[in-house]
Amino acid sequence: MATLSHARYGKANVRLAKVHRHAEDNTQSITELTVRTLLEGDIAASWTAADNTNIVATDTQKQTIYVIAKQHPVNPPELFASILGQHFLDTYPWMTKARVDVTVHRWTRMEVEGKMHPHSFLRDGVEMREVECEVIRGEEIRIRSGIKGLLVLKSTASQFWGYHRDEYTRLPETWDRILSTEVEAGWRWKEFENVEEVRKEEGMFDGAWSDARRITLETFAQEDSPSVQNTMFIMAEKILAAVSGVEVVEYSLPNKHYFEIDLSWFNGLKNTGKDAEVYAPQSDPNGLIQCTVTRKDSTPPKL
Ligand SMILES: O=c1[nH]c(=O)c2[nH]c(=O)[nH]c2[nH]1
């Protein structure tokens, strides 16, 4: 006989935008989100016995997302995710865990004739702010925040040498190369007792996001990088030093290679080493370098 060992379900890719009207200065702002909810609890009978009694339809979950977004703040996304997750547990006593993932899309205020425009925005890049949140009945609230899709490149001050060499090695050592990556960074918060505790600490979520983003960009730009590995570790160390509520920092960085092109076949044209100017950007394959950096002596949170 087979057993259902795990089941959860919900609505993914729920898109919503909320307009904030600021009466004081007659400006508006907008927050655009993609939300995913996943519920767990006493729901197995739907899978194993075709009994939907305890199934809160995924359509109901979607409608709930809209209603909660109307009734509560959607910023910071960590608080919105906690409120939504707690709502599902409060409303449906047979549910034991609500997982809520929120992606915030960029809308940056337009500058028009040298002034910030009151209600017009532009999408300046595909970078996203990410939140994963688990609200568990009788336990704590777990939150992981992050950045995705932040594409960066530096045209020098990146090296890679001293690595293991054997009969499979073709890569030449380099003391000057292009370095490019699409930043995926995440930070796991200490656990929160309840939504009230998340609300109390509301201000630190935006602060952590802007610190992590600033540290990532500054370190990338300023360090003469000996490897992606070392650069990402320094970024993570700095974030842990800057943001006290964070216990773990994770990075996942693709190494988006830019190959030198040997043009010596063309009348001895020099285009390698210190003469390199024209490069071939590679879409694949790419290096992929990941790390988890934990505050010393801390118990890492579970999410
Ligand atoms: O920063 C790097 N780390 C590596 O592990 C690696 N491997 C590689 O081929 N190039 C690079 N660059």
Image (cartoon, rainbow, N blue to C red):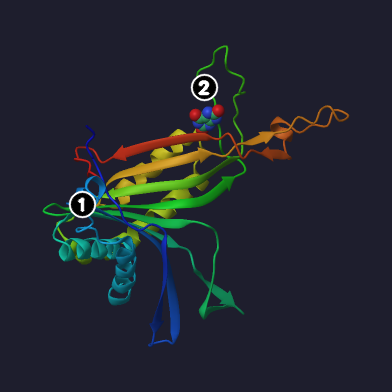
In the displayed structure, 169 sits above or below 211; it is above
Left or right of 104? Residue 259 is right
Give me the residue at 73% from left, 33% from top: 261
Task: Find out if the beta carbon at label 2 lies less than 8 Å from the nearest ligand 1 atom.
Answer: no
Q: Amino acid at mark 1?
A: Ile
SS of the residue at dot 2? loop
Residue 274 % position (x, y): 70, 33
In the displayed structure, 97 sits above or below 73; it is above
Residue 141 % position (x, y): 20, 54
Q: Nearer the viewer, residue 169 or 37?
A: 37
In the displayed structure, 260 sits above or below 248; it is above
Mark whose residue sits in front, 2 or 1: 1
Disc 2 marks which residue?
A: 162
Q: Nearer the viewer, residue 221 or 148?
A: 148
For marks 2 and 1, give the CA distance.
55 Å
In the displayed structure, 108 sits above or below 210; it is below
Extreme right residue here? 267
Residue 20 can be seen, yes or no: yes
Q: Nearer the viewer, residue 272 or 259?
A: 259
Q: Nearer the viewer, residue 147 or 45?
A: 45
Q: Amino acid at mark 2?
A: Gly
Give me the residue at 58% from left, 18% from top: 169
Residue 201 can be seen, yes or no: no
Residue 167 % position (x, y): 57, 11
**Quadrant of the frame with the N terminus:** top left
Residue 285 % position (x, y): 58, 34
Left or right of 14? Residue 125 is right
Disc 1 marks which residue?
A: 43
Circle 2 packing at 10 Å, graded few (<14), some (14-19), many (20+), is few
